[in-house]
Amino acid sequence: MPPPSEQKFLTDPQAFTDVSRGNPQPHKLKGEALVKARLTPETWRLEIVSDSSTQIEKPRKIDDNTALDLPALEALGKKHGIRFLKAMQCLNIAQPLGQGLWEGVPLREVLRLVGKVNNIRRVYWSGFHNNDPKQLFQSSLGYNQVMESPPGDLPVFVAYRLNGEPLSLVRGGPVRMVVPWAHGFKSIKWLQQITLTNDYKANDTYAEANNDPDSYLKTMARIDEGQEAFKAGERVRVTGVAVAGWSGLKSVECWVRPETGKHGALPPEDPAWATAKWQPCRIDPSPDDWASQLPAGVKPQDVWGFDPKTGQPRHWPMRYSVVRWTVTLTGLAPGAYEFRARAVDLNGYAQPEPRAYPKSGRNEIQYKPIVVMA
């Protein structure tokens, strides 16, 4: 494994794990089908409308040619644009999908295009899914969450670039929603319509499958696949990644014990958890040279969360990002062992707390077998 200074912090857009929905998947459409779906940079349009419960001054519609196009969105970005680093994480997949530098416009600035709004409580949005109501994929937030964020916090935004390049179809382009603090289902791909409503209820497709529609990103550690058997006297090195979720990331810890013959099965109520001896793992430091990590022409000072004077992150690990960790185990006699890793957040909660249940995201403690051979 290369040293931290040589590791790439950003995932190549083509290397993200793909969890696209739809039959056919929108990014696999070709030719005229893409044009009809308005999924080319030239044909993409965004409608901003309301239902009967809410009134808006200047709706943006396809029918009267007032819908927002990509050049207009990019022009808005020249004044209000934002860039930030974020890991994408599926609610029901434990491993992070990939990490990128996302660029776009805060959703609140896009909504200002419709002028005065009356009687509103929530913002709904949806993407292209083959014009089939059964394939509709949608999400939502409260109007206050969209329009207001504390100074220094990230806003919800409409993204059109990833890692310095136009957002590709496979990543949800030409334009997608990005909700920084949430699991991926809030960040709808192939964005095409925003609806303002006085309905207070979430409309999220994932909620219909008994998942939490708020779904703040969880802090957790995952273990890399790789070597499990080592010779006695050989360095036993284990690596992995940690997600700095909504509550941030303080540390990563590991626990090693002799194999119990249960192939790693350890129920939450097992008394062994109470006597476990956790030891610290090393979190990779911030790269010294961020210019080599970011796309050409992007300065660290242009990215949210970086100090404009030093060009370094204000906090490390950066919230909503993924960092690597490693530990070298010493003194292991020949035999079989169980290795586990967990993250600890900035509030002092150790994984899987404070939200141990998977309806708002998976964060179970992972197990890895290790064998030291005589």
Image: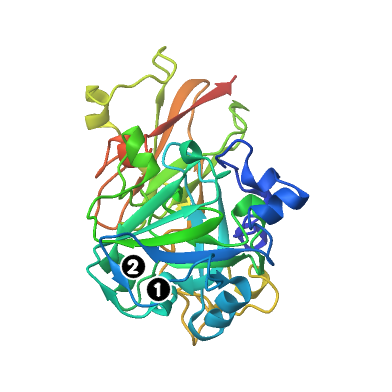
Residue placed at 31% from the left, 53% from the top?
345
Q: Quadrant of residue 360?
A: top left
Q: Nearer the viewer, residue 290 or 80?
A: 80
Residue placed at 51% from the left, 45% from the top?
96
Please tell me how many numbered marks the rendered image carries: 2
**Which residue has dot 2 on it?**
146
Mark 1 or 2: in front is 1
Q: Amino acid at mark 1?
A: Leu
Label 2 neighbour load within 10 Å: few <14, some 14-19, many 20+:
many
- Residue 13 appearing in the image: no
Q: Quadrant of the C terminus?
A: top right
Q: Amino acid at mark 2?
A: Val
Evaluate if marks 1 and 2 touch, with contact meaning CB atoms under 8 Å apart: yes
- The chosen color scheme is rainbow
Q: Nearer the viewer, residue 207 or 329?
A: 207
Left-right relation of 357 to 160: left
Outermost residue, right side: 31
**Which residue has dot 1 on it?**
111
**Residue 246: where, in percent of width, then height?**
33, 57
Q: Nearer the viewer, residue 91 or 174?
A: 174
- Residue 63 appearing in the image: yes
SS at badge 2: helix
**Residue 129: where, in percent of width, then height?**
55, 45
The CA distance from mark 1 to mark 2 is: 9 Å
Left-right relation of 329 to 36: left
Residue placed at 38% from the left, 19% from the top?
265
Residue 62 numbered mark, or none: none
165 vs 183: above or below: below
**Residue 120: where, in percent of width, then height?**
25, 66
Residue placed at 25% from the left, 48% from the top?
349
